[in-house]
Each structure stands twice: as C-alpha cells, then as structure tokens.
Image (cartoon, helix red, strand yellow):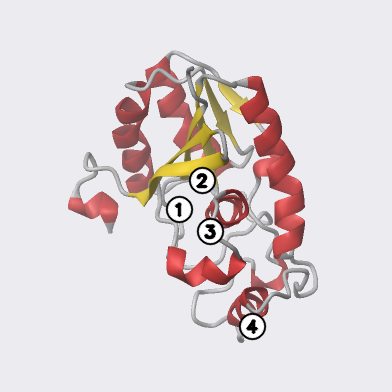
Amino acid sequence: MVRTRVFILRHGESADPSVFHGAESDIGLSERGQRQALAVAPLLAAHAPAAVVSSAMRRAQDTAAPIAAACGLPVLLEPHLHERRVGMLSGMPFGSSEGLWPQTLRRWIAGDTAFAPHGAESFDNVRARVVPVWERLTRAYAGRCLVIVTHGVVCKVLFLSLLPGLSVADWQRLGPIRNVALTELERNQGGWEARRLNELPDVLGREEMG
C-alpha cells in the first residue's frame, strides 16, 4: 500500500525578518529568502510530488514558485493557509511587543487556547481554519506525495494538532519553525507520523541557514 506523504515547510526569509508579519502584512521574500526557495526546490522535486500547494500570501507564493517549476507543476493556492492574524503586533519589532506575544503563548501553553488579543487569532481559531484544509488536501492526494508551503504558526499548529503525543503544551519544546525547514509527515493506520520534523535541508549553505 502506498502511503500519503506530505512535505510541509515555512516560506523563505521575508523581506524584513526583524518585525512581526501576520496575515496583515503581505510582504515578499528577501534575497536570502529567494535563494532558500531555489535551493530547496530540487530537493522536493526529487520526491515527484503530485501537487505543490501554497498559502496565497506573497512570501509563501514566492517560495512555492521555484519548487513548483522544478516539479513541472502549477502552484495551487489555498487562501485559508495564511499566517495567523496578529492584530496590533503587525509590523512591531521583535522584543518590543509589550508582552503581547509572550502573554498569548503562556496562556496557550497553560491550556487557554481560545485566548487572543484584540484583532488577533487564537490557537483555536488557527486550528479551526487550517485543519479542515489539511484534511481536504490529504484526502484529495491520498496515496501520493504533496508539498505544502505555508507559515510558521500554521505549521506549528498543524504539528501540535496532528501528531500523536504532542499538544499545545509542547509549543516551546518544538522550537521555532525555521525558514524552509522541512517536515515530512506520513499517514499510517494510526494517523500521522513525522519522518522528519522541522529539519533544515543540507543543501542550504551557512548563510541561508542563518
């Protein structure tokens, strides 16, 4: 029996990686981000995916485009895979968030996954938006290989929702989702298992890993 496999990755580095970019900020890639996307493309093409799916945001589409080209496929857009809405954090430098993100994360880890500051999405909001997309795509490409390009929080919410033994309490243990780090999930009889989780490809040079 051929199992369903999904490679899921966060987009390449954004044009301004020093600030929060939620769904409110449709920014493109930096030059490093463009190099990251080009470097990872042949690695994913070697697995002959049946489809390359991307969030409709620019930074995800710009990452997915060279991957799809290497695979000889179009980019299929899924608007519901957009990054988390972050409300007033949008455009705010990291480290000057007035405690909003640390407070949100503490409450999620404590089990209050419905919490979100005004204008932002909660863990529950993101999960309710992205898990149905995941289920629909993996049914449509059952028994085949699929590539999904999305965003850091989306990746983490999916991993914590899908993988056995993980929950939102493992948010920090999972670590940050690095740009173009690969996660390979495979469906087995008991659900989804990670063959690799948040791994940076060897094809990336030191600069692209930074």
Whichever of labels 1 and 3 marks the residue nearer the N terminus, that label is 1
Question: How many residues crowd around disc 3 within 10 Å: few (fewer than 14), some, or many (20 or more)?
Answer: few
Whole-number angstrom distance, CA of label 2 to CA of label 4: 28 Å
Q: Nearer the viewer, mark 3 or mark 2?
A: 3
Which residue carries the number 1 mark?
15
- Looking at the picture, how far across and down is residue 132, in whole percent? 74, 40
Which secondary structure lies at badge 4? helix
Whole-number angstrom distance, CA of label 4 to CA of label 3: 25 Å
Q: Residue at x 31, y 26 (%)?
A: 42
Whichever of labels 2 and 1 marks the residue nearer the N terminus, that label is 1
Q: Amino acid at mark 2?
A: Gly
Q: Amino acid at mark 1?
A: Ala
Is residue 32 or residue 80 the one in the foreground? 80
Whole-number angstrom distance, CA of label 2 to CA of label 1: 6 Å
Question: How many residues crowd around disc 2 within 10 Å: few (fewer than 14), some, or many (20 or more)?
Answer: many
User: Does the residue at mark 4 contact the one at mark 1 (Cβ under 8 Å)?
Assistant: no
Whichever of labels 4 and 1 marks the residue nearer the N terminus, that label is 1
Q: Residue at x 54, y 83 (%)?
A: 96
Q: Residue 103: give its label.
A: 4
Whichever of labels 2 and 4 marks the residue nearer the N terminus, that label is 2
Image quarter hosting the C terminus = bottom left
Q: Nearer the viewer, mark 1 or mark 3?
A: 3
User: Does the residue at mark 2 contact the one at mark 1 (Cβ under 8 Å)?
Assistant: yes
Q: Nearer the viewer, mark 2 or mark 4?
A: 4
User: Does the residue at mark 1 contact the one at mark 3 (Cβ under 8 Å)?
Assistant: no
Q: Residue 28: give its label.
A: 2
Q: Residue at x 53, y 33 (%)?
A: 187
